[in-house]
Image: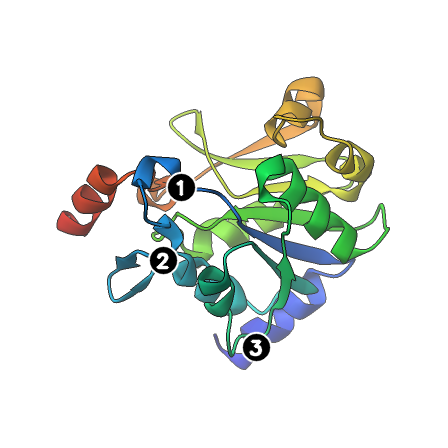
């Protein structure tokens, strides 16, 4: 990124934008493997997301939420805050809670939740999401009206994010507050592809 572009984003993205990278899942459809450690195009799956987010230079903080020691080690050498999830059995809501609490108590903040299984997610898609942030707004990327990740939540929804119930994910907040949702139509459909199982990994590897 050019220095002028860095300065533009540093100035434009004020008010506290926090990236929360959720890497505590159990990868049940991958059998005995942790999919976040599986190599894709020369590096572990989760490392693609780490490198992308750290290369954007527009976040007030980057929090990598991991339960597995090997997954946690993927953040080595990067400007991120590693947060160990000691209760991954509580599901995605625990990673959400840990990340939001780490970002501090502010209604002017913005939280961007990144799953770590989208290796083709690109900087342009992330920037389009960030450009649409507003107080009281939830921003989600879509391709042909199909929603994907990462999603951005205004700090207005901090309490909602911290009080998700067992089994709930942030998407329930979008259901409760449909008028707050802003959809961003993206031009790169590959950016939203998430790898759920070895078959999907094989297909994506073959066609990229």
**In the rendered image of this protein, does residue 171 appear above or below residue 120?**
above
Label 1 packing within 10 angstroms: few (<14), some (14-19), many (20+)? some
Q: Tag 3 or tag 1, which sits nearer the N-term? A: 3
Instruction: Please tell me whether mark 1 or mark 3 is closer to you in this view.
Output: 1
Residue drawn at 78 percent across, 43 percent down:
155
Q: Tag 3 or tag 2, which sits nearer the N-term? A: 3
Q: Mark 3 points at which residue?
A: 4
Is disc 3 placed on a helix, strand or loop?
Answer: helix
Instruction: Answer whether labels 2 and 3 touch (C-beta < 8 Å).
Output: no
Label 3 packing within 10 angstroms: few (<14), some (14-19), many (20+)? few
Is disc 2 placed on a helix, strand or loop?
Answer: helix
Label 2 packing within 10 angstroms: few (<14), some (14-19), many (20+)? some
Q: Which of 137 and 206 is in front in this view?
A: 206
Residue 150 drawn at (x, y percent): 52, 44
Disc sitting over residue 37 in the figure: 2
Q: Which of 71 and 17 is in front in this view?
A: 71
Residue 145 drawn at (x, y percent): 43, 24
Residue 109 drawn at (x, y percent): 78, 51
Q: Which of 145 and 26 is in front in this view?
A: 26
Residue drawn at 49 percent across, 40 percent down:
149
**In the rendered image of this protein, does residue 147 appear above or below residue 33?**
above
Disc count in the image? 3
Residue drawn at 56 percent across, 46 percent down:
129
CA–CA distance in space, label 2 to label 1: 10 Å
Is disc 1 placed on a helix, strand or loop?
Answer: loop
Residue 59 in view: no
């Amino acid at each position: 990124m050019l220095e002028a572009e860095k300065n533009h984003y540093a100035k434009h993205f004020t008010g506290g934008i926090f990236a929360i990278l959720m890497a505590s899942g159990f990868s049940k459809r991958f059998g005995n493997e942790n999919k976040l450690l599986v190599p894709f195009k020369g590096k572990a799956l989760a490392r693609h997301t780490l490198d992308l987010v750290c290369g954007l230079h527009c976040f007030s903080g980057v929090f990598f939420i991991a339960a597995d020691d090997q997954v946690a080690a993927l953040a080595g050498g990067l400007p991120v805050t590693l947060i160990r999830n000691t209760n991954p059995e509580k599901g995605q809501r625990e990673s959400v809670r840990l990340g939001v609490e780490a970002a501090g108590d502010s209604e002017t903040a913005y939280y961007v939740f990144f799953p770590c299984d989208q290796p083709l997610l690109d900087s342009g898609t992330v920037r389009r999401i960030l450009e649409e942030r507003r107080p009281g707004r939830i921003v989600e990327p879509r391709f042909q009206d199909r929603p994907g990740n990462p999603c951005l939540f205004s700090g207005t929804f901090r309490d909602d994010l911290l009080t998700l119930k067992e089994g709930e994910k942030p998407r329930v907040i979008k259901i409760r507050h449909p008028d707050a949702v802003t959809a961003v139509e993206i031009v790169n459909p590959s950016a939203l592809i998430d790898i759920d199982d070895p078959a999907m990994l094989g297909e994506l590897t073959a066609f990229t």
